[in-house]
Amino acid sequence: MKYLVVGCGLTGAVIARELAERGAQVEIWERRDHIGGNLYDYTDEHGFLVQKYGPHAFHTTKKELYDYICRFARWREYHLTCGAVWDGKYTPTPFNFTTVDTFYPPEEAGRLREKLRTAFPGREFATVVEVLEHPDGEVRGYAEYLFQKDYAPYTAKQWGVSPEEIDPSVLKRVPLRFSYGEGYFPDQYQVLPETSYTAFFEGLLDHPGISVRLGVEALERLEIRENRLCGVPAESTVVYTGALDELFGCVYGRLPYRSLRFQWRFSREESFQQAPIVAYPQESGYTRITEYKKLPPQKGVGTVCAVEYPVPYREGEQPYYPVLTADSQALYEKYRALAGKVPNLVCCGRLADFKYYNMDQALERALQASGEIIG
């Protein structure tokens, strides 16, 4: 049986590799002019390795996922640090006891640190949702302060809706830390590719059973009529990793996504900000700045940054983040039901699943889907 994979991001490339290693012939259609999806990186005119679609660092607690990516590239250990700036002051993120000391008077800070330790004994982290729901007024007040200064304005810019409308899973992604420890992820395996993500994809796709066609718009060739896939041979299986509403012509209306616009800045200064990724919740329009000279650490004259502006998703742009609300997830389930009626169609990935995946989650999902297809 032949397979067509729509999309050459992490999900599509991993599924293609898994199928090819079991003797299948796999063709990948990718609408963009490069492999790697949103992980695509390149060396810019100033000699810095940059990521075109925003910063990514691989992290996981699962050795089998780390071992998998090591089959196709060499990786270096890299522990990402992030921060936030408001009222002219910098704090590490996830927010920690340095945050408390920075924004509270010394006596009040000491009392709050002790209350946080008592409120969450033996724990290194809690979500802001947990702290917001705590019965102690000072503990809850700390979370409310952070929510007012960071989460609420950042969320309003990032998602284009009020925090009350966002699925709680979004707010649970960023924890509070009950120590002076720093580092964005607690996972055992935290790495960046020694060469580049693009080189990793080249290794992943280097198999005689895989062919890649770039610049191909699948939705101009594929059509679903009466629960049948048209535009491919009848015996082919299609693995679709794009937006599910677009595959069905948006018959129930569009699923909501957020897109991004990047403003690239080069300056002669050696360092622009204290961490590779810094959020600016009070600034107008943009949410965060990534300094790629620090991601990974690179030598060179000056530094290069990407300023990130969330924008509404429109046709022709890249859908980055699904906007997860009760209404949007109900709409997605209607499209998922349509897809389930189409033989030889497999939908998988961040867009097709309408979920926000970290890299390790996307990899695990791709391996799971590969097993189901093969099985």
Image (spheres, rainbow, N blue to C red):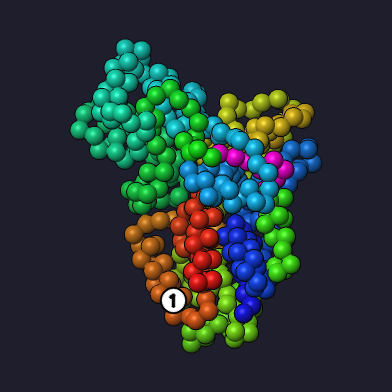
Q: Quadrant of the N terminus?
A: bottom right
User: Is 374 above or below relative to 54?
Assistant: below
Name the residue tied to disc 1: 340
Q: Residue at x 42, y 39 (%)?
A: 174
Q: Nearer the viewer, residue 216 or 196?
A: 196
**Residue 48 falls in image quadrant:** top right
Q: In the rendered image, which quarter is residue 81 located in?
A: top right
Note whether 98 is above or below 347 in the view shown: above
Residue range corresponding to the magenta coloring:
190-197
Q: Secondary structure at mark 1?
A: helix
> Please, what is the three-letter code of the amino acid marked with disc 1?
Gly
Is residue 196 found inside the magenta-colored segment of the image? Answer: yes
For residue 349, above or below residue 109? below
Q: With 107 as the anchor, is 261 left or right in this view?
A: right
The quarter of the picture where residue 133 lies is top left
Label 1, residues with CA under 10 Å away: few <14, some 14-19, many ≥20:
few
Residue 276: give x, y in percent of width and height.
Answer: 59, 33
Residue found at the very far left of the displayed protein: 135
